[in-house]
């Protein structure tokens, strides 16, 4: 699969408006005996979370926190235009647009798989993921695998805490292209200052997780969980597809940033993109395909929990929040 080519297989979503689709957004109520051994009783919640079921999978939406991004960080529009777009949906703040840092804990009854680990306090009001996991009774040692959608610091920094691996028993997966890019000293030297932290965080991850598995394009991690190539935002930017029992969810990471600009304006990018042209091409292909397939998707930086669909609306595309349930 090329960097700008989305295969039909990457969008095999069977989530039509049926009772099965409604079930996909229902709250899971029990854990399997195996998973229950790893997940203790929950304490009082200090951070928000949501939970849905996709077939046999229970997907818990967690957050490491949030930050406000200046309007000028978005490309393809003037800061004033971005501010007006945010104001039109009552999302404009003096400090910019508030974006979330959402993570996903996937439980198949036997394994706990975390997708991304957040910025861990390195930006904005973040660093809440450890507490969020603790609140649902999940210890770091219980995490069996961590899938990194890309190697930007706001997705990987939570892997290391206090100079040690935060998830010592986890297999860690990252795309080979991102690993190569973000551990290249020449690339770091040429990068703008605001990107150097991602190179530094990547080196930390490789040092503390020497057995990190470098993936190549699309592959299956375990039955029902596979990687989808969404290259553009970074050289190895990926999504994670979860599917079982005729239901499907695609975790798309940084394909969308905020409802004020995405998906209505595919030409709006972000200053952190390594290849703006490739990122634009991917959005132009992804947004209409996701709408055509009525795909249930989750995006890291969309307002918590970042769960929704891209839908047509009078010749344009807009974000439609999907149903989800609070954990009680």
Image (cartoon, rainbow, N blue to C red):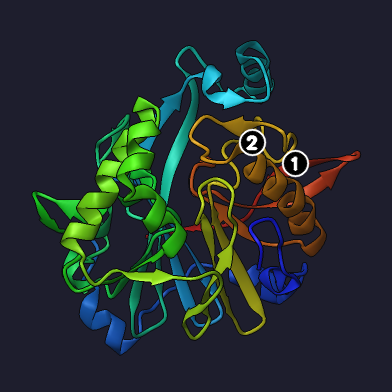
In the rendered structure, the answer to whether residue 150 lies left or right of residue 168 reads: right
Whether residue 200 appears in this view of the structure is: yes
Whether residue 49 appears in this view of the structure is: no
Towards the viewer: 63 or 233: 233
In the rendered structure, the answer to whether residue 217 lies left or right of residue 34 reads: right
Mark 1 is surrounded, within 10 Å at the Cα level, by few (under 14), some (14 to 19) or many (20 or more) other residues, namely many
Which secondary structure, mark 2? loop
Towards the viewer: 180 or 43: 180
Task: Return the mark for residue 318.
Answer: 1
| Residue 78 drawn above or below residue 320 | above
Q: Position of residue 278 (x, y in %)?
A: 65, 45
| Residue 288 drawn above or below residue 165 | above
Residue bearing mark 2: 259
Q: State the separation of the CA atoms marked 2 and 1.
A: 7 Å
| Quadrant assignment for the C terminus | bottom left
Q: Position of residue 303 (x, y in %)?
A: 52, 40
Residue at x 74% of width, y 57% of height = 290
Task: Return the mark for residue 181.
Answer: none
Q: Position of residue 255 (x, y in %)?
A: 59, 47
Mark with earlier residue (2, 1): 2
Write down the quadrant of residue 257 in the picture: top right
| Residue 135 drawn above or below residue 138 | above
Write down the quadrant of residue 39 in the picture: bottom left
Residue at x 64% of width, y 11% of height = 80
- Whether tag 2 and tag 1 are in contact, CB under 8 A, the answer is yes
Mark 2 is surrounded, within 10 Å at the Cα level, by few (under 14), some (14 to 19) or many (20 or more) other residues, namely many
| Residue 191 drawn above or below residue 109 | above
Which secondary structure, mark 1? strand
């Amino acid at each position: 699969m090329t960097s700008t080519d989305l295969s039909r297989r990457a969008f095999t979503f069977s989530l039509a408006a049926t009772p099965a689709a409604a079930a996909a957004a229902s709250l899971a109520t029990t854990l399997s005996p195996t998973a229950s051994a790893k997940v203790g009783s929950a304490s009082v919640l200090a951070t928000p979370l949501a939970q849905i079921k996709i077939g046999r999978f229970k997907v818990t939406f967690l957050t490491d926190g949030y930050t406000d991004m200046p309007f000028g960080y978005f490309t393809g529009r003037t800061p004033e235009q971005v501010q007006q777009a945010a104001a039109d949906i009552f999302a404009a703040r003096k400090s910019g647009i508030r974006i979330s840092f959402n993570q996903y804990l996937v439980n198949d009854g036997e394994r706990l798989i975390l997708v991304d680990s957040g910025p861990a306090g390195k930006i904005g009001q973040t660093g809440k993921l450890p507490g969020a996991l603790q609140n649902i009774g999940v210890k770091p040692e219980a995490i069996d695998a961590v899938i990194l959608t890309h190697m930007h610091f706001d997705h990987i920094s939570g892997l290391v805490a206090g100079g040690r691996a935060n998830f010592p028993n986890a297999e860690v997966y990252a795309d080979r292209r991102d690993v190569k890019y973000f551990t290249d000293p020449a690339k770091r030297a040429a990068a703008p200052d605001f990107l150097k932290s991602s190179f530094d965080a990547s080196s930390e991850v490789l040092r503390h997780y020497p057995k990190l598995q470098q993936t190549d394009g699309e592959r299956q991690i375990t039955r029902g969980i596979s990687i989808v190539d969404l290259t553009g935002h970074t050289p190895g930017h990926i999504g994670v597809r979860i599917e079982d029992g005729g239901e499907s969810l695609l975790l798309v990471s940084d394909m969308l940033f905020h409802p004020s600009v995405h998906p209505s304006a595919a030409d709006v990018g972000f200053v952190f993109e390594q290849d703006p042209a490739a990122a634009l091409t991917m959005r132009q292909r992804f947004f209409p395909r996701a709408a055509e397939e009525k795909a249930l998707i989750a995006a890291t930086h969309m307002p918590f929990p970042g769960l929704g669909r891209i839908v047509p609306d009078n010749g344009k595309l807009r974000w439609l929040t999907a149903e989800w349930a609070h954990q009680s």
